[in-house]
Amino acid sequence: MIIHPQFDPVAIQLGPLAIHWYGLMYLLGFASFLILGNYRIKRGHAFLTSKLLDDLLMYGAVGVVLGGRLGEVLFYQPGYYLSHPLEILMVWKGGMSFHGGFIGVLIGVALFARKHGRSFWEVTDFIAPLVPLGLAAGRIGNFINGELWGRVADPKLPWAMLFPQAKMDDLIQAQQSSDLMVTLLNYGGLPRHPSQLYEFALEGLALFALLWCFSAKTRARGQVSALFLIGYGLARFGSEFFRTPDAGIFGQSDVISMGQWLSLPMIVIGMALFYLFGKRKAA
């Protein structure tokens, strides 16, 4: 049985200054955005300059951090953060909602597009292929922190993993099933899917490959953005079946999780937009 490595969440300690892995993963995501963005600019796939790309990153970074944190507060743990309002600012502890960050980025992009007199879809089509590797870095940060662990897995699964951080969750689940209690006693914990790595592969690497290849050719304006909505929505919806569901504003559910509820509109809207944008090009 594989045991989670229990990484120190602090990557670098400089006196009183602690640099967390989670923060470094965000920096890695922003760096990949700039590297890939400048590559696309040099290849002639963009209306931007390197200077404008830096400006766009600033809008996006502010949107993803503010939106991601507020999304976590509003979608997943409103009761907790209302009781502990100061912890809303403690982003280094983790707790960032993708869907909240996504909304924040859309607002930032809209402001950027308006400032520079560009089409909203023109900007989103450019950034869509640049986003997945940042998502991949975030999932590695989740794995390093040992958070967002997966659902209970078959002990025979070669990559099933014990998460010591889930000790209390393991005990609660084991009390509901004699078979799980036996497993808990035999292994010292419940084997779980390393769902952070599943999401790393699906939302990160696979989605990046899909969008990068699709955007390599000229597409109808908005279709790359629409494909991002479809691809991410499907990847997140599927991976949620292996991830311990969060108790969101609709309550705890092992059938459809909060993450799946939030992903469904992305899939539906993405499919509708992909069809409409394609039809407009054909006309």
Image: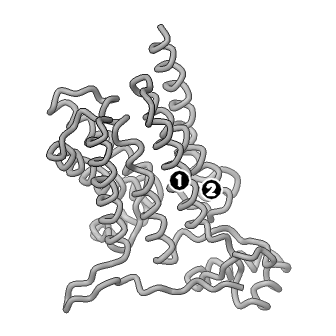
Comparing marks 1 and 2, which lies closer to the viewer? 1
Of 82 and 201, nearer the camera is: 201
Residue 203's disc number? 1
Label 2 sits on a secondary structure element that is helix
Of 228 and 99, nearer the camera is: 228
Quadrant the N terminus occupies: bottom right
Tell me the residue at 61%/53% (across/down): 257
In the image, what residue type sits under mark 1?
Glu
Residue 140's disc number? none
Left or right relative to 243: residue 67: left
Tell me the residue at 32%/71% (across/down): 23
Residue 177, position in %: x, y?
A: 81, 75
Residue 19, position in %: x, y?
A: 28, 80
Tell me the residue at 28%/40% (across/down): 107
Q: Quadrant of residue 165?
A: bottom right
- Looking at the image, residue 164 lies above or below residue 133: below
Label 1 sits on a secondary structure element that is helix
The Cα atoms of the two marked residues, 1 and 2, are separated by: 9 Å
Left or right relative to 155: residue 151: left
Residue 137, position in %: x, y?
A: 43, 64
Q: Quadrant of residue 261?
A: top right
Left or right relative to 22: residue 19: left
Residue 274, position in %: x, y?
A: 51, 26
Packing grade of label 1 (10 A; few <14, some 14-19, many >=20) is many
Residue positioned most to the front = 43
Tell me the residue at 54%/21% (across/down): 275
Residue positioned most to the top = 283
The figure's colour scheme reads one colour
In the image, what residue type sits under mark 2?
Ser
Say if mark 1 contacts mark 2, CB within 8 Å.
Answer: yes
Q: Which residue is mark 2?
A: 239
Packing grade of label 2 (10 A; few <14, some 14-19, many >=20) is many
